[in-house]
Image (cartoon, helix red, strand yellow):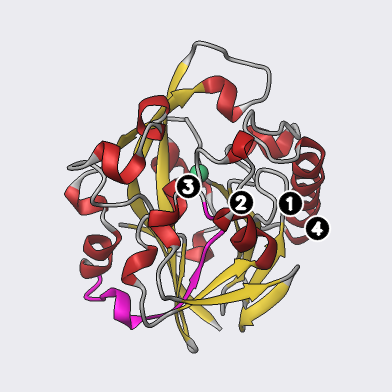
Amino acid sequence: MVKKIWVLKAGALDLDRSILFVGRGFGIKERVPIMMVLLETDEGYVLIDTGMNPYGPKDQEGIWGPRAKDLVPIIEEEDDVRNRLKKLNLSPTDIDHVVNTHMHWDHTGGNQFFTKSRIYVQRAEYRYAMYPDSFYAASYMKNHYDYDLNYVLVEGDMEIVSGVHLLATPGHTIGHQSVFVTMENGAKIIIAGDAAYTWESVEKIVPPGNCYDMVGSVLSLQKLQTIQRITGADLLPSHEPNHEFYHTIQNSFNKSLNLQII
Ligand SMILES: [Zn+2]
């Protein structure tokens, strides 16, 4: 059962609005948050995504290559996943389970520290991340995830611990997954990952500008919208450009989630 949930801030990115919404907002710059989510369960801690690579700021070219010029990363010392965990008196070795929603660089930058964890990723995503097509290779950085780690390759929807379900939501990437969390007290939340960059993406079914498969992305947005409406769950998007984002989730999400933002 899931007892507690924290949203861990992991910096921000400056990007073109047309990446968030296909065909719209060209030339308009947006600053979007990067985040990780930590769950305390009676089967151990579950961390969803690992943020950006903390070595990036000191070696932009070496760690991120040309990508950091298109999408400008903003990451402070405190955004390092190890430092966010430290605030809760935890370290990466305390985390039993890690979920990668997908293998893009802004979600796998801290994977290298989780040498003791089971790391759940969809099989198709892992394979693709190792050998991406050239048109979609820029956001896959093998120096973020190609380590001797305990990857658990999964296919489709599954429960990893009681109350934590992986939902296959391909489209943005070939093997994207979201996470449906049911708290011990019954409160529910969907951690959408990049299947839904924003709330508007889900409400109006607008796929992102950068997709492996646009039709797949639309179907996954429909899946998330349907599950949200049936269950009444709150939905956490991955890169909501609203400047009040953290304030909004703190105030508008179900109070029974007792969501803490670190
Ligand atoms: Zn992302």
**Which amino acid, mark 3?**
Ile
Instruction: State how far apart marks 2 and 1 are (Cα).
Output: 9 Å
Q: Residue at x 39, y 56 (%)?
A: 144
Decide: is 150 above or below 125.
Answer: below
Q: How many marks?
A: 4
Q: Residue at x 32, y 51 (%)?
A: 53
Instruction: State how far apart marks 2 and 3 are (Cα).
Output: 9 Å
Badge 1, how many Cα within 10 Å: few under 14, some, many 20+?
A: many
Instruction: Look at mark 2 in the image and give the residue it sits on.
Output: 235
First in sequence: mark 1 vs mark 3: 1
Give the extent of the magenta segment: 88-103
Decide: is 208 above or below 27.
Answer: below
First in sequence: mark 4 vs mark 1: 1
Instruction: Look at mark 4 in the image and give the residue it sits on.
Output: 230
Q: Is residue 30 magenta?
A: no
Give the mark toward the camera: 1 or 3: 1
| Secondary structure under the numbered disc 4 in the rendered image | helix
Badge 3, how many Cα within 10 Å: few under 14, some, many 20+?
A: some
Residue 83 relative to residue 26: left or right:
left
